Amino acid sequence: MTAMLDISGLTASIGDKPILKGIDLSVPAGEIHAIMGPNGSGKSTLGYVLAGREDYEVTGGTVTFEGQDMLAMAPEARAAAGLFLAFQAPIELPGVNNANFLRTALNAIRRAHGEDELDAVQFLKFARAEMKRLSMDGEMLKRNVNVGFSGGEKKRNEVLQMALLRPRFAVLDETDSGLDIDALRIVAEGVNALRGPNFSALVVTHHQRLLDHLVPHRVHVLAQGRIIRSGGPELAKELEKNGYSAVLAEAA
């Protein structure tokens, strides 16, 4: 099966500290893969490097996204090509209206694809339909981006962005952290609604409960900057039950 995202020998540092020490990972089109691992293992760093965050320096390896050299692309070009990153801790943007922010992002993607931009009326109709599906209060569009939002509201807003932008590849960096059962289900439903042959995702999580809803094709354990073990969904259940000590011992 053709890989949508192919990572080979990826190494990266922040400052003088090496974080990723040789990541090899291939995610075929139409598949959802999960990344699990101890704190400090490099999971969030991998997401930031894929998105092009400038304070992370790639020191080696390659990343190919649908045949393109992703590492040679600017962050906005990666987004236009279909990459989306949902943050572990979405930031607040005081003074920036949520509806304006979302419409600006969506129209930037549409321009890059040669599509007509949506005016305010068209956007609101589209956004409200997606918000209804995600059980979100339409009043959130009137608020500033994430300002005063609860943890669950921030994560739902991330999923709303994903639903509106319809990326080809989504990286979810612990989107499930801090969510109650209902919010977790809604987030998972937002991801599952995009599933199909032209959508793939890399889901970073500590918890089996999200994967019960998503049912990933593969689960990878990232520790000490490398993927040390991969398996099917049953691997997540094993980690939930036994922790990482046995897997880390095997890789030592």
Image: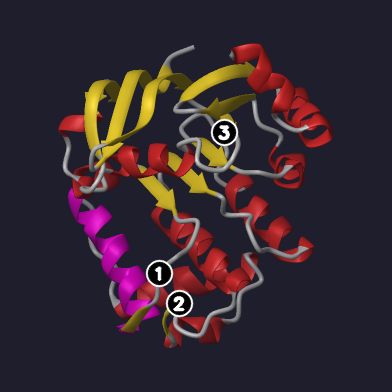
Tell me which amino acid carries mark 3: Ile
Provide the residue span drawn in magenta.
95-113
Tell me: residue 5, above or below residue 155.
above
202 to the left or right of 68: right
Q: Please say if the residues under marks 2 and 1 sit with CB atoms less than 8 Å apart.
A: yes
Q: Residue at x 74, y 65 (%)?
A: 180
Q: Which mark is residue 186?
A: none
Whole-number angstrom distance, CA of label 3 to CA of label 2: 26 Å
Whole-number angstrom distance, CA of label 2 to CA of label 1: 7 Å
Q: Position of residue 19 (x, y in %)?
A: 37, 34
Q: Residue at x 57, y 54 (%)?
A: 175
Q: Which residue is mark 2?
A: 146
**Which of disc 2 and disc 3 is earlier in sequence?**
3
Q: Position of residue 57 (x, y in %)?
A: 22, 37
Task: Report the front residue among 47 and 113.
Answer: 47
Q: Which residue is mark 1?
A: 91
Of discs 2 and 1, which sits in the foreground?
Answer: 1
